[in-house]
Every structure is written in structure tokens, then in C-alpha cells.
Image (cartoon, helix red, strand yellow):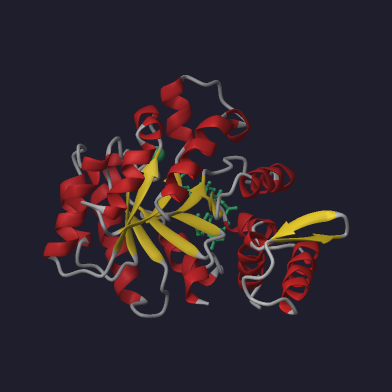
Amino acid sequence: MAEFQARRSLLYVPGSNERALIKAPHLGADMIVYDLEDAVAPAQKAEARERVAEALAGAAGEEGCRAVRINGLDSAWGEEDLAVFAAAPAAALLVPKVNEAGDLEPVQRALDEAGSRARIWAMLETPLAVLEAQHIAAAAKGAAARLELLVMGLNDLALEMRLPAGGLAARLGGARDHCVLAARAFGLDIIDGVCNNFGDEAGLRAECADGRRRGFDGKSLIHPAQIGPCHELFSPSEAEIAHARKILLAFEGLEADSQGAIAMDGVMVEALHLAAARRVLALSGE
Ligand code: COA
Ligand code: MG
């Protein structure tokens, strides 16, 4: 089912790291973001731009979900990044440091003018972006119709909020919940922030489980070793799949529209739970 595109993992790849750029499309991540922004030092910006353009051209048509994170349009590199990548064969441009809906409009315009099919992905990583999340997400229905995905940026958010380092996700629950609400209010997908400690698999698993419980579609990743555990935790479990099948079966014999709520193992199940059950089965590949 095309409408249930898997978005369990979004792997950042530094645009300046040639080995990582070559490796990335073969690691099995659902989305890859070739990064020109935070992962690339100022002295390497120009070279990274060339490497990323080459990487995109080299595998054109092979990998659907590859995006480029451009530098902010108020930085020294953003305008040129946008000019170079507006017409590139990328699935999306990821826009960092979005503060308000209007920040997406120059990107929408540039993609329109280039005749591109690329979508817009927007980072929520400043206090203002979190407060404005509703209006940023609403832009998908208005001036930034290419917007399809929101991506949490917890490191920048924590920096601006002056949070001490470590365990960021656990302390940003309120902001993350707020952004999930904003995404869903306008039918967008949303990806949780990164776990910086890429050697800590148990910590990553706990963050993935927490993100999924909060409604995120997937998680931002920085290292290949994070992909496997992330996919496991953002896929429906055997128990969830079995439960979903049971709900479908329970409603199967009933006349359409004849039954609002039924009892199943002492728990109320409503017709609305059918939609959730179908989504679980679609995500599990059934
Ligand atoms: N994407 C693709 N490949 C990656 C990768 C990534 N994000 N991170 C590491 N690799 C590759 C390495 O190139 C290396 O491949 P090689 O053996 O062919 O050289 C292999 O995986 C093992 O890497 P490892 O030695 O364990 O990691 P490292 O010490 O070289 O790098 C980081 C660690 C964190 C610097 C690196 O993973 C990284 O740059 N991650 C992305 C950072 C980023 O984009 N930040 C911005 C968004 S928050
Ligand atoms: Mg950032």
C-alpha cells in the first residue's frame, strides 16, 4: 500500500565523507539525508556540495528516498545550496532551522521554478519552531504545498533551551508531543530526533520505543549500527500484528456500518480501531 510508505529510519550522511556517501544507499535505511549543514565544517562546504551532487547523479533512479539537507537560507551557503539542488534528482530538500511557515516559501518557489518533483522536509529544532509547529505544518495546505515531513532536531533545540547534555529525548517529551500533534493535524509524517550515543544500543532501543509510543513514524539516525534496532522497534510486533488480525476477524462477519463497538477479551473495540488495525497490517507488509 503506497500510502503507508515506511519511514522508520532517516540516516544522516555527512556530505563531506566520501566513504559514508558511497555506503549509505546500501545500508537499508528508509530515508537518507545527505547533509550539507551541521555535519560539514565551513571549510568543507563547497567540496561537500560537489560530492553530494555526484552521489545523487551517480545513483539516479536507484534509490527513491534520498534527500539533501541544505544550509539555512540565512547562512553564507544556503542560497547557493538551494540553487544547486533545486533541480537535483533528490526526493526532498530538508530545510534546517525553520522558525515559521514563511521560511518554507523560498524553497517552495525555487522547486516550482526548477520544475522539480522534490518534496520539502522541515526541521523543527528551535524553540520558535516548536511554538509555531501548527502554522509550519499548516503550510502544507497553503504556501508550501510540497511539505510532507517534519523532522525533530533535538541537539539544536536543547542548545537553544540551554539544556545540559545527555538524554535529550527523555527531557523533551512535551515539545516532541506538541510537534506530533501539529504534524497529524495536517496529515504530515514526523520523525523523532537523533540518539548521539551511537555505541549505546540499549539507550537507542529505549529512545525508539519511546518515540513510537508518542506517535512518531521513525527516528533520525547518525550511524549504520542504529538502523537494525530502529527498524525492529518501529515495526509492529508479533503481538500487535496478531491483535490487529483479531480485530479484522471480529468485524468481518458483521454487516458494514451495523456495529459501533464490540467486546473482545473483555476490552471494548470500536469500528474506529479497524483503521488502526489495517495500518498495523499494512506497516507489517500484509
Ligand atoms: N552514513 C553512512 N555511513 C556511515 C555513517 C553514516 N552516517 N557513519 C559511519 N559510516 C560508515 C563509516 O564511513 C565507516 O565506513 P568504512 O569502514 O567504510 O570507512 C563505517 O560506517 C563505520 O563507521 P565508524 O568507524 O563506526 O564511525 P566513525 O567513527 O567513522 O564516525 C560519526 C562516527 C558519528 C562521526 C559518523 O557516524 C557520522 O558522521 N555520522 C553522521 C553525523 C551527522 O550527519 N550529523 C548531522 C546530523 S545530527
Ligand atoms: Mg541542527
Residue at the image point whose x is 38% and y is 44% from the top: 123
- Horizontal side of 222 relative to 202 (left or right) equals left
Residue at the image point whose x is 68% and y is 77% from the top: 255
Q: Relative to the observer, which residue lies in front, 80 or 7?
A: 7
Residue at the image point whose x is 88% and y is 59% from the top: 265
Residue 185 point in image, percent of width and height:
43, 48
- Extreme residue in the front direction: 258
Q: Relative to the observer, which residue lies in front, 72 or 236?
A: 236
- Horizontal side of 88 relative to 61 (left or right) equals left
Question: Measured along the vertical axis of the image, is residue 260 above or below residue 115?
Answer: above
Work out whether residue 257 can be spotted: yes
Residue 9 point in image, percent of width and height:
54, 58
Residue at the image point whose x is 27% and y is 42% from the top: 43
Quadrant location of residue 66?
A: bottom left
- Horizontal side of 142 relative to 281 (left or right) equals left
Work out whether residue 199 can be spotted: no
